[in-house]
Amino acid sequence: MADTVEFELVSPERLLLSRAVEMVVVPGEEGDFGVLPGHAKLISAVRPGVIEVYEGDKVTDRIFVAGGFAEVTAERCTVLAEIAVPVAEIDRGRVEQDLRNLIDELAAAKSDDDRASVASKIAVAEGMLQVVSAAR
Amino acid sequence: MPSLKSLRLRINSVKSTRKITSAMKMVAAAKLRRAQEQAQAARPYAERMERMLGSLSASFAGNEGAPALLAGNGRDKTHLVVAVSSDRGLCGGFNGAIARYVRNKTKRLIAEGKTVKILGVGRKARDMLRRDLAGLIAPGSDELGRVVVFGRAQDAARRVAQMFEAGEVDVVTIVYNRFKSVISQIVTEQQLIPFAPPSADKASGDKAKAGASGADLAIYEYEPDEAEILAKLLPLNLSVQVFRALLESTASEHGARMTAMDNATRNAGDMIDRLTLNYNRTRQAMITKELIEIISGAEAV
């Protein structure tokens, strides 16, 4: 058996990552899970968090994802993320600014639908901030 | 014979038309590159999504509790056709192809005794279909906007889902121009509800076979559980498929416009050549005529 998994991370806008890696840690809805070669077939929802790609026992990529799904088979691991940003590219100032704007928007939101969509955006922004502060 | 002045005016007007068409071509070319990149970047996501749903639906095959978005509501009476077009014209046969396809499909469905509703995305679809299918167009058809964003696709998908849930429609198909190359766009039809993986289209007729391959796929574990994942995945898939159609359609639109404008520029060039030839000939004829008049006048003296 190959000692790598084909890992793919795609967001609606682009294909972020597609290569063979040793291990991926995915933030699943019910807890993080690591994917090694030969993993049991699994489909899981993904909560906002960080995907860590391991190569040679080291983390080579850290990517923030917000919501989506992961499909795991013995040979590959595909993550469909609604939003995916490499942690290194998160601009703290911008996210904080966005968060402030969103909180204002929440106050101004009229219908329940609007409020729910703004609230989910806030959750994403807060998740991003947490990740950035944890990294430093 | 037209006067010199009117010829000169026409040449000038065709020249400015050519300037406009060639500028539009450049703009379309620039936009095309962006749209094409975006469309191609979105393809993997939509394809993976389809594959994932394909295996999920296989595990639900024959299961009574399958959600309606996946399995349909069991009826086949009212069809909703989502026609994706552009907001603006001047792009060759782009919108015409969509309108023609939708019109034929509508006629066919009505002939089969079904009810048809049309949801136009992009202004042109609505404008073109309003003439003969006005009564069928569902409210809420509207413009595309300048840039395709995921949110726009989500809005459209939500509206489709609402109509489906309210029982207004039973089967939903989307018709759009798939971008093959700059000069070739293919009108493509894709069924959105009930979900039909395109690769499995032919196999679905043969239920037994589909069931056998489904058993192979159905050993996935689900986290949280199947129903919950499906409940989230299905609306998302709808948005993603609409989004993909919009992106493909935008890329196609710019491609079609670029080709159309390229042709228009070339035609204008030909026309200018012809008119200029005509102009020069007329000018020469005038000069000759004047010379003859002078000479014959001089001879008469």
Image: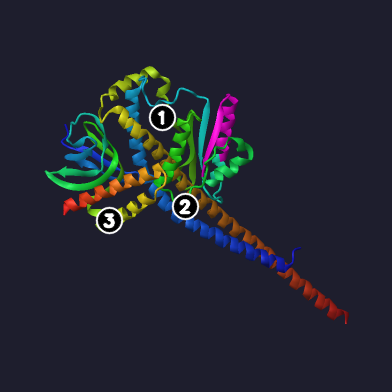
Q: Which residue is mark 1?
A: B69
State the residue position of label 2: B146
Between residue B145 and residue A95, name the one nearer to us: A95
Type of the residue with mark 1: Leu
Residue at coordinates 53% horizontally, 45% vertically from top-left? B94
Q: Is residue A13 visible?
A: no
- Residue at left offset 56%, top offset 43%: B126
Write down the region rendered in magenta.
B99-121
Left or right, A73 with respect to B190, comes to: left
Q: Residue B1: x and y, percent?
A: 76, 63
> Percent position (x, y) of residue B13?
63, 63
Chain of the residue under label 1 = B
In this rendering, which labeled residue sits more in front, label 2 or label 3?
3
Q: Residues within 10 Å of mark 1 (few under 14, many from 20)?
A: many
Q: Is A110 or B294 nearer to us in this picture?
A: A110
Placement of B166 over or under B126, stated as above or below: above
Label 2 element class: loop
Q: Is residue B251 left or right of residue B90?
A: left
The local crowd at label 3, few if under 14, some if 14 to 19, many if 20 or more residues have their Cα within 10 Å, is: some
Q: Is residue B164 left or right of residue B60?
A: right
* Residue labelled with disc 3: A96
Residue type, mark 2 in image: Arg
Work out whether A86 lies above or below B189. below
Give the farthest residue toward the left.
A57
Q: Give me the residue at 30% from left, 53% from top.
A: A99
